Amino acid sequence: MTPRGDRVPPAGRVPPAGRVTRPRRGSLAALLAAAALLGAACGASSSPAPATPAGPPGSPAGATPTPAGTSGVSAAPGSSSAPASAAALPPGAFTFSLPTGWRAVPMGGNHDALVAGLRSTNAAFADSLASRLANLAATATYVAFDASPEAVRAGNLTTLVVTEVQLPLAVTLATFTTTVQGQVQQLVEQPVEAKKILITSGEAYDIEFIAPVQRPDGSQGSAAITQILYVLPGRGYVMTFTAPPAVAPSYGKAFADIATSFTIKL
């Protein structure tokens, strides 16, 4: 199986399969649209998406971040080392623990060497990754992907893209989540649940859905999306995990472990 370079349209552009209504300019919805409409490109899919997800990308038991209020969480919000405000933090001031086989991609510079190293194994995978990196949203501050030999050979481009959105200081995690959730529901045209979870940096929300995407040849595809939303006063963080729907369930634990490890770097 080879990737087809499926992409979710940039924020503010109406996706052919999604018929998203653009938020009014100047509103909070407009401010958060880049996060809600997946400014980062989505993963390739080689099979049609179901009308509704049969299960979230992390559907196996224990494969999603631990819900708030249950045991086994990395840290309770009160013990988080996150600062009280994001005002003094530069973009990208956070860390992750990536699973074996995953690789973080430098945000600046040329990616030719990285792409060339993958091309000998799967040229289509390399081309899809190159297209993904070339079409990142301006608000993207971190990218990683599953670079394991198995994923590359199979053509399953599975990625994590973090975007950061500047917010008014009064915007809370709940408000941020409600706005993003509403935009996602317009995109997929069905209800989407937002689940409160705990990660190392404190409380967050998890939204999972199947999104329509448009391939470079104009045909329609789909991608399984898991978004983790986190807020510090003045800044919203959106961790967008994207995988082909056929393989998304197998990534549930990896997505959960990566998201839970998200730590603000002081």
Image (cartoon, rainbow, N blue to C red):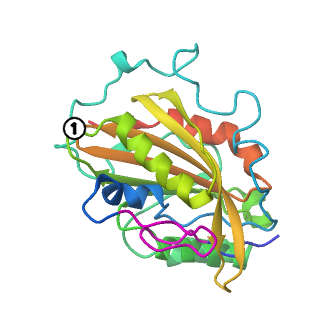
Q: Main secondary structure of the magenta part?
A: loop
Please rate how many residues cluster around mark 1, counting C-alpha atoms within 10 Å: few if below 14, some from 14 to 19, many from 20. few
Q: Which residue is mark 1?
A: 170
Span highlighted in magenta in the image: 7-23
The answer to whether any part of residue 138 appears in the image is: yes
Amino acid at circle 1: Ala
Relative height, residue 32 to residue 5 (above, below) = above
Outermost residue, bottom direction?
A: 217
Q: Does the stretch in magenta take in 138?
A: no
Question: Which residue is rendered at x = 82% and y = 65% of the image?
Answer: 47
Relative height, residue 243 to residue 88 (above, below) = below
Q: Does the stretch in magenta take in 21?
A: yes
Looking at the image, which is closer to me, 49 or 73? 49
Quadrant for the N terminus, please.
bottom right
Say whether residue 245 is left or right of residue 176. Answer: right
Q: Quadrant of residue 222?
A: bottom right
